[in-house]
Amino acid sequence: MSDFPTIVPASVIGKNAPGNQIQIGIIGCGRYAISHDIPLTALYQNSRIIAVCDVDTFRTAAAIPIIQSSYRQAANSRNENISDWSIKVYDNYRELLLNPEIDAVIISLPDHQHAVVAVHAVRAGKHVYLQKPATLTIEEGKILREEVHRSGKVLQIGSQQRSLFPWPQFKRAAELVRNGKIGELKEVKIGFPADTGGGHSLALPIPAELNYDAWLGPTSFLEYMEDRVHPRSGHHNGIYHRPGWLRCESFATGMITNWGSHHIDIAHWAMDTEQSGPKEIIGKAKFPREDENYSGLWDVHGHFETEALYDNGVKMYISSKLPHGIKFVGSEGWIWVTRGNCLWKDGIPIPDEQGIIALNASNQKILHPEMKTGKTLLYESQEQHLNWLNCIFSGTNPVAPIEIGHRSNSACLLHWIAMKVNRKIHWDPIKEELSIYDPEATALLSRTRRKEYDF
């Protein structure tokens, strides 16, 4: 599911680039860091990745030539020359955070590590780019939010659908909805795929190059299985295959936060509920372990359907049976948005090279480029990493700050909790707690963390 662009318009890299150099450390050198965060950060000549950290030394060794190559390619595109430089290597992120030369860190770790590492980073005085979802639990999100606010550091969530590159259609759709172009918003329908069961549950010796206890971090000890962690081989040009931890509930909650963090975030943007959340959520899902004959390892939810109600009366439906994208349904029409190249012909959206119409509506007049959006203009970010760098210099909030990332992730997790308890739950988005006594659901708002890997 890599969305790393191969060509970035010069306008993205040019006049809006920061005016000074930010020294960056990479924490986590897996699939998404290699394919997305490193190449995009390297585009900007005023950033410099000077350190890498991973508990798997195989991955730090693979990351260094990719970093150097990414910066060389970016320099070549500007007709500049750049010499290789020394990149420090760490196997313990706490040691990296002690390096006073590092101004900021990019955290691209398994979901169960996000909160603790990000808290330690802002306490160490570092700015943070944190891959989504913000945290593994709602409790962790509240802790991280408070620590970021206390630190005064800039934290950007990797919710790149908010930025114009590479998908400007999401901001446009959100603006059109916010400005009433489809009348009063009634429903939001979100679709994305579900995971399937599988994975080999054979315990294996821990690889010599992996500090497995540190990889587990806050999570209780589990036997090492390659399909529980990440592939030891099978990568192409440093791009690794999808890791198994994404499909294990000890480390993640499945597609509801994997894709939901993107699409619910855009829905909240359009609904003007970025700092709120649903008040009622009901859901059902198929979990692999419900089958008594299941012998696989992966246990996150499969096919699912959920529904949420917001204070403004809008209902949100999310399902693996719906088309992949977001449909906003109003009293006077609808708007559909998804990933893909947003192409136009004579003012009408047309399919891209894959046959995808990335932005569509019940009436094409709603979408015509010459139509003014309206009075409400949303935050404009050219590209997510560039926006983060600019905000470090300006001291302003990025397009996806911790509060927004926490709220969209909280909504995802509430849908997951409704799936787990298989009934309606009631939420108070102001107090951020369940509004009706429900011990079973309350237990899912947090998880126990091992003391040596806690906040």
Image: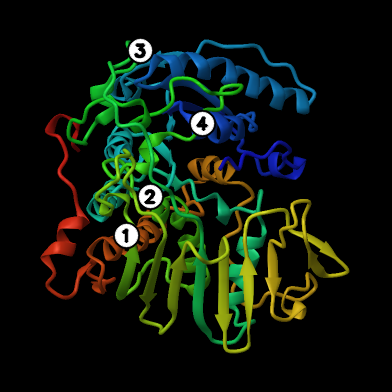
Residue 109 shows up from this direction = no
What percent of the width, then of the height, locates residue 69? Answer: 64, 19
Q: Amino acid at mark 2?
A: Gly
User: Tags 2 and 4 in contact by the CB under 8 Å rule?
Assistant: no
User: Tags 3 and 4 in contact by the CB under 8 Å rule?
Assistant: no
What percent of the width, then of the height, locates residue 48? Answer: 55, 25
Quadrant for residue 51, please give it: top left
- Front one among 281 and 118: 281
Label 4, on which residue? 241
Label 3, on which residue? 209
Label 1, on which residue? 416
Q: Earlier in the sequence, mark 4 or mark 1?
A: 4
Spatial CA distance of label 3 from label 2 is 27 Å
Left or right of 340, for residue 272: left
Q: Earlier in the sequence, mark 3 or mark 2?
A: 3
Give above or below for 135 relative to 408: above
Q: Quadrant of the C terminus?
A: top left
Spatial CA distance of label 3 from label 4 is 18 Å
User: Tags 1 and 3 in contact by the CB under 8 Å rule?
Assistant: no
User: Tags 1 and 2 in contact by the CB under 8 Å rule?
Assistant: yes
Q: Amino acid at mark 4?
A: His
What percent of the width, then of the height, locates residue 211? Answer: 29, 18
Left or right of 109, for residue 182: right
